[in-house]
Image (cartoon, rainbow, N blue to C red):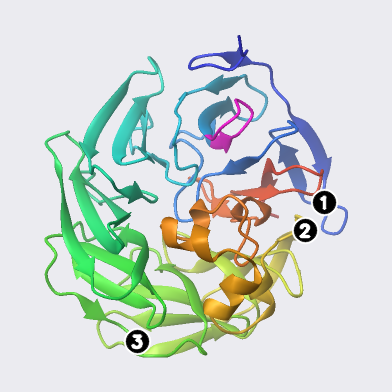
C-alpha cells in the first residue's frame, strides 16, 4: 500500500539557503525525486493567511495537490485523483478549499476534511486551469471536446455549468476573470491573433489586437485590477494594452517571460530565459527591472529559442502531432518539448503580502517548489 493517500501527512522537506548571486533568502519547500511545482503563475500558491502553500506533486504516482505549512510545516496530501490537471488549482478567497479540474469535471476539495465536491461535469471534455470571478460565484475554464475548443462557466455553489462560447477555428487557453469585474473574461487564442475578451454570458466576444504568428505575443494577464492587460512580445519586450482604447505600449524592452502583476498594477514579476537573467521585478512606470534571484531551472522548450508561435513543422519536428490533437494545450502534454515541459519553467507568482515569490526549479535534478524573499 502506498504511503501517499488523501489526508496522509509527511514531514517537512525544508532546506534554506541564500541565492549565490543576489544573497536573497530562499526556502526550498519540496525535496522529492519526482515532479513538484507551484500552482500556475496566474494564481497565488499561498493561502490568504500565508500560513500554507498549495502545490502539485507526482510523488503519489500521478498529479495530486498537496499543502505544506510555510515554511517548515508538515506536507499533507489533499487529493487522490486519476486525471487531475496539475496547473488547474485555485485557492478560495477564504482559504478553506481548492477549486480544480479532473478530467471532465470541475471540483473542489476542503482543506480541513479533504471532502470533495463535483461542481459540474462536461462528459467527453478535457478541461484546463480554473479562474474564479471577483465575486467568487463563477469558475471559468477552457475545454477541448469533439475537436473544438470551448469556454465553460460553472457556478461555485454547485448549481451547474455551461458552455458560453465555442471557437470556430482556434484553440482556447488560459481564460481568466478580471480581478474587479465579475462579468469580464480574457482568454488566449492559438494560433494568432492571441488576445480576446468575452462577457461571462458569452456575449461581446472581442479581439483586442490583430497580428499574425510572426508577432509572438504570449502569457497575457491583467495589470492588477486596472482595465489593462500586460503581455510578453517574445523575446523582445513587456507590453501593456488598454481594454478601453486598445492602445498598446511598451513597458520595458527585455525578455520578460511568464509575467504576474501585483494588485496595484505598479510592479510586474517575471522569469527570463535565452538569456536567463533570473527572476526580475519590473517597475511599470519606469520600465526598470532588478533581479530577485536566479532559479537556474532548465527552462525547456525549443520554441522559446524562436520569436514566433509553433506551427505544424515545429510540432512534427518534435514528433508531437498526435499528442497535440488530443490535448487542450501544451500544458497537458506529458512529453512536450516544444513549449515545455511546463514544470521546468519557474512560473513565479506573488505571495498575498507581495513580499515573497513562489517559483519552480529543477536545478536539483527534479522540479521542486521554492519561495524567495523579495529584497
What type of secondary structure mainly makes up the magenta span?
loop
342 or 256, nearer to the observer:
342
Locate residue 270, reporting x and y percent: 60, 65
Of marks 2 and 3, the one in the foreground: 3
297 or 326, nearer to the observer:
326
Query: Do residues under tags 1 and 2 come within 8 Å of each other at their CB atoms?
Result: yes
Residue 323 visible within the image: yes
Please name the residue that numbered disc 2 is placed on: 294
Please name the residue that numbered disc 3 is placed on: 209
Please name the residue that numbered disc 1 is placed on: 19
Q: Which residues are magenta?
A: 55-63
The residue positioned 42% from the left and 45% from the top of the image is 88
Q: Hey, which quadrant is residue 268 in on the image?
A: bottom right
Q: Residue furthest right?
A: 20
261 or 202, nearer to the observer:
202
The residue positioned 60% from the left and 28% from the top of the image is 61
Residues under labels 2 and 3: Cα distance? Answer: 33 Å
Q: Earlier in the sequence, mark 2 or mark 3?
A: 3
The numbered disc on residue 154 is none
Does the magenta segment cover residue 57? yes
Of marks 1 and 2, the one in the foreground: 2
- Describe the element under mark 3 as helix, strand or loop: loop
Locate residue 245, reporting x and y percent: 27, 88
User: Seen in the image, is 273 located left or right of residue 355?
Assistant: right
Amino acid at each position: 500500500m502506498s504511503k501517499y493517500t488523501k489526508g496522509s501527512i509527511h514531514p517537512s522537506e525544508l532546506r534554506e539557503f541564500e541565492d549565490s548571486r543576489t544573497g536573497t533568502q530562499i526556502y526550498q519547500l519540496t525535496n522529492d525525486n519526482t515532479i513538484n511545482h507551484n500552482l500556475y503563475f496566474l494564481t497565488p500558491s499561498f493561502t490568504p493567511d500565508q500560513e500554507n502553500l498549495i502545490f502539485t506533486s507526482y510523488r503519489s504516482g500521478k498529479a495530486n495537490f498537496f499543502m505544506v505549512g510555510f515554511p517548515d510545516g508538515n506536507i499533507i496530501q489533499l487529493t487522490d485523483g486519476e486525471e487531475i490537471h496539475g496547473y488547474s488549482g485555485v485557492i478560495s478567497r477564504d482559504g478553506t478549499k481548492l477549486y480544480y479540474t479532473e478530467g471532465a469535471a470541475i471540483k473542489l476539495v476542503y482543506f480541513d476534511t479533504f471532502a470533495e465536491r463535483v461542481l459540474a461535469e462536461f462528459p467527453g471534455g478535457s478541461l484546463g486551469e480554473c479562474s474564479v470571478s471577483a465575486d467568487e460565484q463563477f469558475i471559468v475554464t477552457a475545454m477541448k471536446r469533439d475537436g473544438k475548443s470551448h469556454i465553460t462557466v460553472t457556478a461555485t455553489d454547485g448549481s451547474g455549468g455551461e458552455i458560453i462560447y465555442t471557437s470556430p477555428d482556434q484553440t482556447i487557453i488560459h481564460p481568466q476573470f478580471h480581478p474587479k469585474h465579475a462579468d469580464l473574461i480574457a482568454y488566449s487564442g492559438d494560433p494568432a491573433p492571441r488576445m480576446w475578451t468575452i462577457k461571462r454570458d458569452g456575449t461581446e466576444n472581442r479581439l483586442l489586437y490583430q497580428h499574425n504568428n510572426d508577432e509572438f505575443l504570449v502569457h497575457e494577464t491583467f495589470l492588477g485590477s486596472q482595465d489593462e492587460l500586460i503581455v510578453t512580445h517574445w523575446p523582445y519586450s513587456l507590453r501593456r494594452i488598454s481594454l478601453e482604447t486598445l492602445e498598446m505600449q511598451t513597458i520595458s524592452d527585455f525578455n520578460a517571460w511568464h509575467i504576474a502583476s501585483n494588485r496595484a498594477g505598479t510592479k510586474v514579476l517575471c522569469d527570463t530565459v535565452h538569456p536567463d537573467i533570473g527572476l526580475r521585478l519590473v517597475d511599470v512606470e519606469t520600465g526598470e527591472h532588478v533581479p530577485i534571484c536566479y532559479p537556474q531551472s532548465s527552462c525547456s522548450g525549443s520554441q522559446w529559442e524562436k520569436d514566433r508561435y509553433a506551427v505544424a513543422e515545429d510540432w512534427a519536428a518534435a514528433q508531437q502531432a498526435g499528442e497535440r490533437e488530443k490535448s487542450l494545450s501544451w500544458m497537458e502534454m506529458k512529453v512536450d518539448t516544444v513549449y515545455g515541459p511546463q514544470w521546468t519553467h519557474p512560473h513565479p507568482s506573488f505571495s498575498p503580502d507581495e513580499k515573497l515569490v513562489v517559483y519552480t526549479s529543477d536545478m536539483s535534478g527534479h522540479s521542486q517548489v521554492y519561495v524567495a524573499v523579495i529584497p
